[in-house]
Amino acid sequence: ELGQKEREYSELEEEWKAEKASLSGTQNIKAELEQAKITLEQARRVGDLGRMSELQYGKIPELEKQLAAATQAEGKSMKLLRNRVTDAEIAEVLARATG
């Protein structure tokens, strides 16, 4: 029985790690995209047309595609981690707070 519980634990741990990586991946892509947009604006200010075109037509669209794919993957049902709060959970908290 102990061996079975250890296997269940390791399976759940792997699933948890995969879900956590998915969530943090989206956050990293968003941060990278924001930084690319800031760099684009800086290049625009100094008139660096080569850097602007590299960012505007290369890096930023690629990051947006990655973000869309990561967001879609994140939208799949997760068993162990959640990044969204449901209406029922909000109602439960309000009911406890207001009595």
Image (spheres, grey):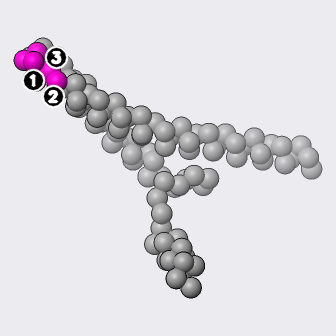
At numbered mark 1, what does the secondary structure look like: helix, strand or loop?
helix
Q: Nearer the viewer, mark 1 or mark 3?
A: 1
- How far is disc 3 from disc 2 in space, using C-alphas? 10 Å
Nearest the eye: 12 or 97: 97
- Main SS class of the magenta portion in the image: helix
Residue depicted at 86% across the width and 47% down the height: 4
Point out the stretch of residues depicted in magenta.
Answer: 42-48
Q: Is residue 77 above or below residue 88?
A: above
All told, the count of numbered labels is 3
Residue 17 visible (yes or no) = yes
Instruction: Tell me the quarter of the image containing the C terminus.
Output: bottom right
Q: Are marks 2 and 1 in contact (CB under 8 Å)?
A: yes
Q: Amino acid at mark 2?
A: Glu
Categorize mark 3 by other alpha carbons within 10 Å: few (<14), some (14-19), many (20+). Answer: some
Q: Residue furthest front?
A: 98
Labelled disc at residue 41: 2
Nearest the eye: 11 or 87: 87
At numbered mark 2, what does the secondary structure look like: helix, strand or loop?
helix
Q: Residue furthest bottom?
A: 99
- How far is disc 1 from disc 3 in space, using C-alphas? 11 Å
Nearest the eye: 96 or 76: 96
Residue bearing mark 3: 51
Quarter residue 69 falls in: top left
Q: Amino acid at mark 1?
A: Arg
**Residue 29 drawn at (x, y percent):** 37, 34
Labelled disc at residue 45: 1
